[in-house]
Image (spheres, rainbow, N blue to C red):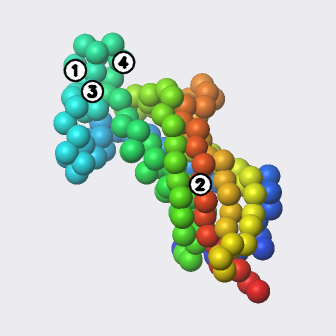
Amino acid sequence: MADQLYYEDVTEGMDIPTLEKHATTRSLVMYCACYEDFAEIHHDKDAAQEAGWDGPIVPGLFTAAFLAQMLTNWITPEGTIKKIQANYRRPHIAGDKMSLKGKVTGKREEGGSCLVDCEIWVENDKGEQTSPGSAVIALPCRG
């Protein structure tokens, strides 16, 4: 388990450790079954290609789950994601490398909580930003 990150350890402009992921066709089938998302472009290569894509498209919420995993890896065990949002501007195809990244944009104490504002995003293997977003996390304070 990772060492606990504390509010006092975080500085504005700090990079969040990058998480590299590849959504496989198998993981897409499992995701689609769990979420009852039966749009064939998310799990069937032929259907995706008929729709004009190179292969099955990674659903936006699956991408958001990877962003949440990146944050959780960074803030565990006692940090909490309070808010997360992302926009899906370019699709990822099954098997594509996805680099999940983030940066601290601000810190504040509010209502007894130590909050950290973050800019988060996904990049494709060409380094293009595909899914920009933001998050608010709560971290334990030392004081």
Judged from the image, the secondary structure of the residue bearing numbered disc 4 is loop
Q: Which of marks 1 and 3 is nearer the N terminus?
A: 3
- Asked if the residues shown at circle 2 and circle 1 are in contact, with their CB atoms under 8 angstroms apart, the answer is no
Q: Which amino acid does label 3 sit on?
A: Ile
Where 26 sits versus 8, above or below? Answer: above
Judged from the image, the secondary structure of the residue bearing numbered disc 3 is helix
Residue that numbered label 3 is attached to: 41
Residue that numbered label 4 is attached to: 54
Q: Which of marks 1 and 4 is nearer the N terminus?
A: 1
**What is the distance, in whole Å, between disc 2 and disc 3 at their CAs?**
28 Å
The image's mark for residue 47 is 1
**What is the distance, in whole Å, between disc 1 and disc 3 at their CAs?**
6 Å
Number of on-image labels: 4
Q: Which amino acid does label 4 sit on?
A: Asp
**What is the distance, in whole Å, between disc 4 and disc 2 at their CAs?**
31 Å
- Asked if the residues shown at circle 1 and circle 3 are in contact, with their CB atoms under 8 angstroms apart, the answer is yes
Judged from the image, the secondary structure of the residue bearing numbered disc 1 is helix
Closer to the camera in the image, 75 or 125: 75
